[in-house]
Image: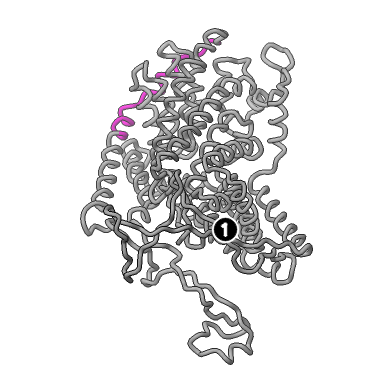
């Protein structure tokens, strides 16, 4: 395991601020040094969202004073009469011809924009009503985030499994049992799937891979690079749903409903098919770069410092750990088998379509309303008045809609399934190895998962204010309609938008760290805009995963870069941050090109990205 990167020596080595081991002053790194300085000068994500919320307040006041206006538009779909295989028209239930969206050669619905309603104007937050709303809704803006509960519940189980050592044992066993020739693909593949264990992969896998490579006669730095490439560069891939997937889904749902109030909800498994295939793509790319580019270059350079190889014996599993791992795998099979039965057995609890309800049996609905004066109330029928008092609210003409649409029952239970799939095997492992002995051990392990997401909760509080301020002012819809109309007029094809968005996220990774915080800023802007040209929120999220992941291995803003650097210096004492970035740059380039091309090929295949996850957005007919 690497030493504490926060110590004076490690920090100095990582920043390049002290003399090198040879006594020579550190070399200036030009652009990389500039990027590092600028990145370090940026505010922390929570503070950044607070600043963005302040910016929304200021812009709403300026826009209101300057009388900004944006004409809302409606996406109308060209329709054609549906016919059967024989060419006969298909009739609807009322006997009229059934109409379906007309598609172009790429399979995208042909749409046009029509003005609808009065022009939108920004609502000023610096008014009496605006200030009242900000204060009265502060808590609700935080607790109402749909991703909050998803992340919290999933991390209860994941954190427990990590605390008791299940993930560490599983990674070590897989790596140690892998043949020498397949060591690289296995290391990269494990790394690409390690995001399910939160950030444990950064701590466990790179030093383990370096020791394994050294033990089999290969360059340890190549093992370190392969592991880091899989963990960081493949962070957006993986064959298992994660807590981050739930967060992205919640933010994507809110963003999509800026344009289409009835959209979704986007499921936590919205990218699961693409993610699973991406893990294989990352594995193949990492295998090629490691064995054909990185390791030959390291051998040519030479300069491998001596290292203590006895640490390899410490990586082997003890008898208790092996037994615990075996028992945990049996429990996992039982848990997954039980869920399979609940899903596929006829009339089982998770089989078929369901609608989430409250404990009272009622369902959440969204009803359009209008506020009327006291004088108007006197003229309204009694059954039309929902509330009387200082504020009188009546139903508007628009019909109510369900807040949560009916869907596959199993997809609505995906977060509890993730929770139990890690909680029960983690408990079994902890009990066998002795890590779980008392109820205090259990509670501390549960707390461990919650502690790991405390930064996310802090970020979520300020992000909730920013997102809801954006909605209250109407600036979200104004920006979406203005930007979307420009995209429609420019007729930018979806594949080009995908590539441009990946590049934009890549650039953003050098200015703002954190997968979730960046998405919180970008999603409310780009998802609605892209929907107006037929790009689904799920496709936007898939492109975001690529752009965010491929730069993780080279951006100085990645906080784990220091930990990896400490491990690198174990084998090459003169290595600095520039050495690490130059080592990982080939991975970043190859991952970015191949993974983006893979998404484009997926788009042209027409295959969904995950459960209930279309590639194209087709507005309601």
The residue at the point 69 percent across, 36 percent down is: 40
Where in the figure is residue 418, as x and y percent of width and height?
A: 38, 47
In the image, is residue 618 above or below residue 610? below
Q: In this view, does 428 lie to the left or right of 30?
A: left
Q: What stretch is highlighted in magenta?
A: 305-325
From the top left corner, tell me how far across and down residue 173 is, in percent: 35, 27
Give SS at disc 1. Answer: strand
Please rate how many residues cluster around mark 1, counting C-alpha atoms within 10 Å: few if below 14, some from 14 to 19, many from 20: some
Furthest residue to the left? 346
Name above or below for residue 72 compared with residue 279.
below
Residue 298: x and y in percent read 54, 12
* Residue 552 position by quadrant: top right
Q: Examine the image and state in which quarter residue 143 appears.
A: bottom right
Q: Please indicate, yes or no, whether residue 161 appears anywhere in the rendered image.
A: no
224 relative to 579 in the view: left or right: left
Place residue 559 in its image quadrant: top right
At x 49% / y 49%, what residue is drawn? 536
- Indicate how the structure is coloured in the image: one colour
Task: Name the residue located 33 percent from the left edge and 42 percent from the top edge.
Answer: 425
Residue found at x 74% / y 65%: 126
Q: Relative to 169, is 485 above or below?
A: below
Q: Quadrant of the C terminus?
A: bottom left
Residue named by callout 1 = 113
Residue 464 colored in magenta in the image: no
Residue 323's place in the image compared with 308, above or below, is: below
């Amino acid at each position: 395991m690497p030493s504490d990167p926060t110590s004076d020596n490690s920090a100095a080595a990582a920043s390049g601020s002290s003399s090198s081991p040879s006594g020579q002053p550190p070399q200036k790194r030009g652009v990389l040094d500039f990027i590092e300085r600028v990145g370090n000068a940026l505010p922390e994500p929570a503070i950044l969202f607070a600043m963005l919320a302040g910016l929304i307040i200021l812009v709403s006041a300026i826009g209101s004073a300057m009388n900004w206006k944006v004409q809302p538009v409606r996406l109308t779909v060209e329709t054609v009469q549906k016919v059967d295989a024989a060419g006969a028209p298909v009739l609807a239930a009322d006997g009229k011809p059934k109409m379906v969206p007309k598609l172009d050669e790429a399979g995208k619905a042909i749409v046009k924009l029509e003005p609808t309603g009065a022009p939108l104007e920004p609502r000023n937050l610096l008014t009496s009503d605006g200030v009242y709303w900000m204060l009265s809704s502060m808590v609700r803006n935080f607790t109402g985030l749909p991703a909050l509960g998803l992340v919290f519940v999933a991390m209860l189980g994941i954190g427990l499994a990590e605390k008791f050592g299940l993930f560490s044992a599983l990674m070590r066993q897989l790596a140690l049992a892998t043949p020498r020739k397949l060591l690289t693909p296995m290391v990269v593949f494990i790394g690409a799937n390690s995001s399910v264990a939160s950030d444990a992969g950064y701590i466990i896998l790179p030093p383990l891979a370096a020791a394994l490579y050294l033990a089999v006669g290969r360059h340890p730095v190549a093992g370190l690079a392969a592991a880091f490439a899989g963990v960081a560069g493949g962070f957006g891939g993986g064959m298992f749903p994660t807590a981050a997937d739930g967060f992205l889904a919640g933010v994507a749902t809110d963003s999509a409903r800026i344009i289409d109030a009835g959209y979704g909800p986007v499921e936590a498994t919205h990218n699961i098919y693409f993610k699973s295939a991406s893990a294989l793509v990352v594995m193949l790319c990492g295998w090629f770069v490691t064995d054909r580019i990185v390791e030959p270059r390291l051998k040519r350079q030479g300069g491998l410092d001596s290292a203590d190889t006895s640490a390899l014996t410490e990586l082997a599993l003890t008898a208790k750990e092996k037994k615990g791992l075996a028992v945990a795998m049996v429990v996992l099979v039982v848990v997954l088998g039980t869920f399979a039965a609940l899903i596929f057995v006829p009339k089982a609890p998770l089989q078929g379509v369901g609608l989430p309800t409250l404990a009272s049996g009622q369902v959440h609905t969204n009803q359009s309303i209008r506020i009327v004066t006291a004088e108007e109330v006197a003229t309204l029928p009694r059954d039309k008045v929902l509330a009387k008092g200082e504020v009188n609210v009546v139903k508007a003409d628009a019909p109510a809609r369900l807040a949560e649409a009916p869907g596959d029952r199993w997809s609505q239970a995906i977060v509890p399934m993730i929770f139990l799939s890690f909680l029960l095997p983690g408990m079994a492992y902890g009990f066998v190895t002795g890590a779980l002995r008392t109820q205090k051990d259990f509670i501390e392990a549960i707390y461990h998962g919650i502690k790991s997401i405390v930064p996310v909760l802090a970020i979520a509080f300020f992000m909730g204010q920013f997102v809801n301020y954006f909605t209250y002012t109407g600036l979200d819809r104004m920006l979406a309609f203005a930007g979307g109309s420009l995209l429609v007029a420019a007729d930018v094809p979806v594949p080009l938008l995908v590539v441009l968005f990946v590049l934009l996220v890549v650039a953003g990774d050098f200015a703002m760290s954190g997968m979730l915080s960046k998405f919180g800023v970008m999603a409310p802007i780009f998802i609605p805009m892209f929907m107006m040209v037929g790009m689904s929120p799920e496709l936007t999220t898939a492109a975001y995963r690529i752009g965010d992941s491929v730069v993780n291995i080279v951006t100085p803003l990645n906080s784990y870069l220091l930990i990896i650097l400490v491990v690198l210096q174990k084998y090459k004492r003169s290595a600095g941050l520039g050495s690490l970035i130059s080592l990982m740059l080939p991975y970043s380039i190859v991952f970015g090109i191949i993974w983006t091309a893979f998404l484009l090929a997926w788009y042209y295949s027409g295959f969904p990205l995950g459960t209930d996850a279309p590639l194209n957005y087709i507005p309601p007919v």
